[in-house]
Amino acid sequence: MKPMNLSIKCFLGFHEETQVDFRPLYEDKLFLVTGPTGAGKTSIFDAICYALYGEGSGEERNKAKCYRSQLATDQEDMEVSLDFEVRGEGYHIRRVETAKGLNKAFFYSDADPEKLLTKIREVNQEVETLIGLSLDQFKKIVMIPQGEFREFLTAGTKDKSEILKKLFSTEQYEKIQWLIKAKFDEARNLDRNLVTRFQETLKEYAIEGKDIEMGPDALEESLKTEEENLQTLVNAGEALTLQEKSLEQAIRQREKDNQDYREFQRVREEFLKIQGRQNAIKVREKELRLLKKIEAITHLEKQLLGKEGEIKKYKAELTELAEGQRKLSQHREKSGKALDLLNLEFQGLDQLKEEKNRWTSLYEKSLRLHDVMKKLEAEEKRGQENQRKLEYLKKKEEQRRELSLEERSVSESLSQEKIREMELKLSLQESHGRLKMLKGLYEKCQKWENSEAAIMQLKKEEDNLQRNLLVGQNAWTSELKKRSANYAAILRAELEEERPCPVCGSLEHPGVSREAQDFDEEALNRLEENCKKLERDLLEKNALRQNTEKNTAELLEEILLLTDEQGIQGHRLDDIRILGVEEKAVYRRIENQTLENKNALNRLTTQKAGLQEKITDLDRELEHLDDVLKEADENKAILGELRGELKSLQSEGVPVETQALGLKIRELDRTIKDITQRHEEARQAHEEILQKEKELSGRETALHSTLVGALDQAKSMKDQFYEDLDKAEVSRETYELEKGNVQRMGELEEEVTRYYQSYNGAKGAFELLQERGEQLIHREVEPLQEQLKALQQELREKQAEIREKTILYHNLQKAHEKLTKIHEHYRTNKKMLLMVQDLHDTAIVGMGFETFVQSYYFEGILLRANERMHRMTEGRFQLRRRNETESRREKIGLGINVFDEYTGRERDVQSLSGGESFKASLALALGLSDFIESHKASVNLETIFIDEGFGSLDQDSLDNAMECLLELNLSGRIVGIISHVTELKDRIPGKIEVKTVPGKGSVIVTSGRKALMK
């Protein structure tokens, strides 16, 4: 994990938002956090730890949960955000504690910013998975806080065991240890249980003195004996079974012969019986042939009878029609006389109608008189109502004039606000465009600064590659010289006596041989390949830098052109940020004015709509004013007309009473209607009689024609019938006698068919059984059945004996199988028991499994720590695991002694001085981080932080410690140190200086080579 940028607000001593950019400090792989005591140096590391895990680096603050700044107001939130890298991939995490104490967390990666984690639990799991360390592991390996630096060095065996358990999760080995014990107990108990079950199985068959190691062989002798006894019984039973089967077969054969004999007798009797009915069937056949001939002719007789029935029907209808015509003629004469009388009465009808018209006219005028009087009264009332309406509408007309004046004033105000709305929209668009431009400019400037930083980095990498190339070329040249100098020595080394020299051919080689210099051909090739690779990398890096410089120059040109166009002085990020803030304030102000304008528009629009609605309502009422005026004029005219008409009717003497007039008119009307109705009914009746006479005459003609045709068809059918009888050679007497039996034809045909089927079947069966049946006689079966019963009784007794022996044998077999399974289980478990017992004796009886694993890790840590300790103490001190333990119950301890070369003795680390103790602690911490990184692939320790302790070192010890820390550069690891030691300030160029400002809290200043260059 490598922190890149840290942002703090309202966290511990940092009240205002503070940015800590670590990137300029990574140039030398070593940086210092310095400042007065209490200024907030450790707070920076607390903030990193809090951002990653939600807790600080120190135990005391974690217990108190007091990270919120004392200077924070009740409305301010505490925020800590961190940009960091793991294996070159960028990530961002931010944690917020609101003023109300609500905690929030946000996490995303630069590769996939859309995937944002917001749940604290998910964020914590993702960070722990990404870094590969829990909070406790992180604090003891990556960020060693103040007060806990010497804990691992001076802790006892028990405490170190707990620390190692947290670092390496060794509790799983303790679980394995107890799992081994459980497996051992399980296997041992199973072994005892299997032996007991084996002995109990043998006791069931009265077998004793056999060991489980014999396995199933313990039952072998008894099983063999019982098998032989059972086989003897089975053989005897099989012999009896064969005798039984032989007798059963003889009985079945005799029963079959007797059955076949009885069947033959039955079939012969049945055949003779059927054969005796043959003459009667032949008579039936002859009768059947006659009925078939008659059946072919009966359909003609049926058609003839049908036609004769139709002729009778036609004759009956003609008779009925003649009678109907006679009756109609009589009715016609009567109706004609009645119609003549009614015609005379109908001629006086016109005089009655004229009289009715006179009375009706007088009645209508009387009704009109009543109507005029009512209308006159109604029109007078309507005139009064119109007068009241006119007075009401005049008042409404005055109200409308007042509302129109008010609506005109509101419309003018609304127009002014709409003009202001357009102006504000234009201003808002201009401000938004400028904000967008400033954002783009800011991003370009930020990209330009990042490009400048990248160019500086590329130049630095070019210089490093150039130096590495120079070193590599020197090494390659030196190795090349060694190879040239060694050619002769190598050749002399290969010469042997009595073998010719490959150069001169001599068999004697008197020259003094020199030892060849230490030379490795593979090393030379590697150096050459390394030089070539460095040259390629240098060329690629140079091309990349030039391309970046070109792009940066073009970007700067774009920035300058944009700032000139917009009249912006300079292109510093802070200036552009200030301009953006100012423009954003302008934008917000215009937005507020727009909101006020919108509220005014809404208010005026609502007011105008209300006035318009009132005016509309008044207009709707005033719409009827013209109608009311018109109605008043019409009322006056109608009143004049009605009064004139009333006067005219009264002068004609029209009576006011209408009841008597009505009665007279109704009486005349009834008389007229009665005469008219009776005359019409008599006329219609006479016409209907005439029409019916005409219809009957037509039907009579049609029926007579149909009857003549039917008589001709009947004669033709009768001739055909007698002709078919002659052809069938059937006399008329025979036909009349037998035609009633035609319905029996199906029954006769079925009887004949059934007879011949029975006859053929019986004949076939008789012929099939005749040859064998005539040779058979009936024989008794009882003697053989008595023999079979006696034999079956003997067989049952033998089978019972076999079953008893079989059960015993099968039980022995099951016992044998059971013993086999027990023995196999016993052997399998025995192997497991021996293996688990070895593990148990190792993990339980001796050193604990977890202790063994921890001791392995501990030895690895001490091995790497001593490499650091040797350099920092110039070979004087060496850390060793203490041979004796603090507790007699433990087989091995995790205590540390220090071996002093000056005295040649070991002593407790507690006896070290402050400076010596710091060296040992630092060496142990660095050894721990080295060991963790080499043994856990998921952990990548790019950065390590150390809090305090260097003030206890003298100058030489400080130099040694610095050299040891600077060696970490070779592995690319970055070291951050918190200290106020003056020598460190002078020797470490990359610094974060923390200061306190009264009333404002802590502030920082970052200085490094890259920062100084800027």
Image (cartoon, rainbow, N blue to C red):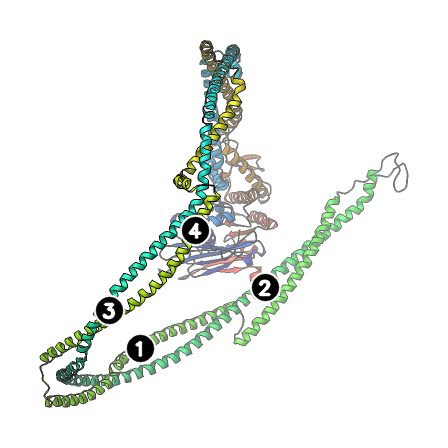
Counting residues from the N terminus, which is met first, the one under dot 1 or under dot 2? 2
Q: Amino acid at mark 4?
A: Met
Badge 1 crowding class, 10 Å Cα cut-off, few under 14, some 14 to 19, many 20 or more, is some
Image spot of residue 53 (x, y percent): 45, 50
Q: Which residue is mark 1?
A: 609
Task: Calculate the distance from the C-alpha at mark 3 to the C-alpha at mark 4.
Answer: 45 Å
Q: Tag 4, which secondary structure?
A: helix
Q: Which residue is mark 4?
A: 717
Image spot of residue 500 (x, y percent): 89, 37
Q: Is residue 374 above or below residue 956?
A: below
Q: Which residue is mark 2?
A: 451
Q: Is residue 358 left or right of residue 224?
A: left
Task: Calculate the distance from the C-alpha at mark 2 to the C-alpha at mark 3.
Answer: 132 Å
Counting residues from the N terminus, which is met first, the one under dot 3 or under dot 1? 3
Is residue 478 in view?
A: yes
Q: Is residue 153 above or below residue 597?
A: above
Task: Calculate the distance from the C-alpha at mark 4 to the C-alpha at mark 1.
Answer: 105 Å
Counting residues from the N terminus, which is met first, the one under dot 4 or under dot 2? 2
Mark 2 and mark 4 in contact (Cβ < 8 Å)?
Answer: no
Q: Quadrant of the C terminus?
A: bottom right
Q: Which residue is mark 3?
A: 332
Corner quadrant of residue 363? bottom left
Q: Please tell me whether mark 3 or mark 1 is closer to you in this view.
A: 3
Q: Please tell me whether mark 3 or mark 4 is closer to you in this view.
A: 4
Residue displayed at 39% across by 56% down: 710
Q: Amino acid at mark 1?
A: Ala
Q: Please tell me whether mark 4 or mark 2 is closer to you in this view.
A: 4
Badge 3 crowding class, 10 Å Cα cut-off, few under 14, some 14 to 19, many 20 or more, is some
Task: Calculate the distance from the C-alpha at mark 4 to the C-alpha at mark 2.
Answer: 127 Å
Q: Amino acid at mark 2?
A: Ser
